[in-house]
Image (cartoon, rainbow, N blue to C red):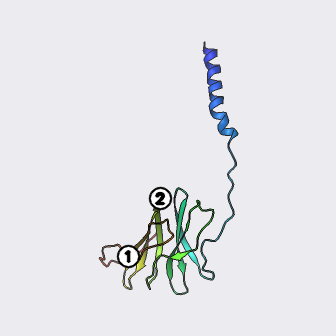
Amino acid sequence: MKRMLAVFVVLLTTVVFLPLFAGAQELVWDADRIIENNYGYNGDTPKVAISGDNAVAVWNQYDGSRNHVYSNYSTDGGATWSSDQPIENNSYGGNYPQVAISFNTVVAVWVQSDGENSRIYSNYSSDGGATWENDRIIDNGSGYETECKC
């Protein structure tokens, strides 16, 4: 009986796990691609969020005098990307962007000076990052100097 049980376990293990190994494919990375189109200026601190096949990236982009927050989106899991766009339009620029996505709703936040203090700003997109609303300040305005170590 023990021998029959052992044979059964071996057969069951083979039936369950062999198809997993037989169908396993080697992970292959695609070619890298530039998703920002601001040649001559440095982009940094990129962040990406993914929900299903939707992906949104945000980063700082220097314009020659200050950083601004830019974004780009993909609807095919990052295989192709649209055109990048700024998502904040304040004269002081923004730094340390973060992004989150759920289905087609995207929220980005960043640190931005108001000329005297650093504040937290936000913007959102309801179409997966294709278009963005107007950015707005979301902190309580207490006026404390803050520095992000993101």
- Badge 1 or badge 2: first in the primary sequence: 2
Which residue occupies 68% across, 60% down?
30
In the image, what residue occupies the spot 69% across and 54% down? 28
**Percent coordinates x, y for residue 73 in the rendering:** 55, 67
Secondary structure beneath label 2: loop
Residue 40 seen from this side? yes
Vertical placement of residue 52 versus 65, above or below:
above
**How far across and down, in percent of the image, does residue 130 sit?**
51, 70
Give the number of the mark in front: 1 or 2: 2
Mark 2 packing: few (<14 Cα in 10 Å), some, or many (20+)?
some
Q: Which residue is mark 2?
A: 103
Q: Is residue 57 above or below residue 52?
A: below
**Relative to 73, is 132 on the left or the right?**
left
User: In the figure, 127 relative to 22: above or below?
Assistant: below
Where in the figure is residue 120, as x and y percent of width and height? 38, 74
Q: Which residue is mark 1?
A: 136
Q: Is residue 150 among the parts visible in the rendering?
A: no
Q: Quadrant of the N terminus?
A: top right
Q: Are marks 1 and 2 in contact (CB under 8 Å)?
A: no
Q: Label 1 amino acid?
A: Arg
Left/right of residue 39 with respect to residue 69 in the rendered view: right
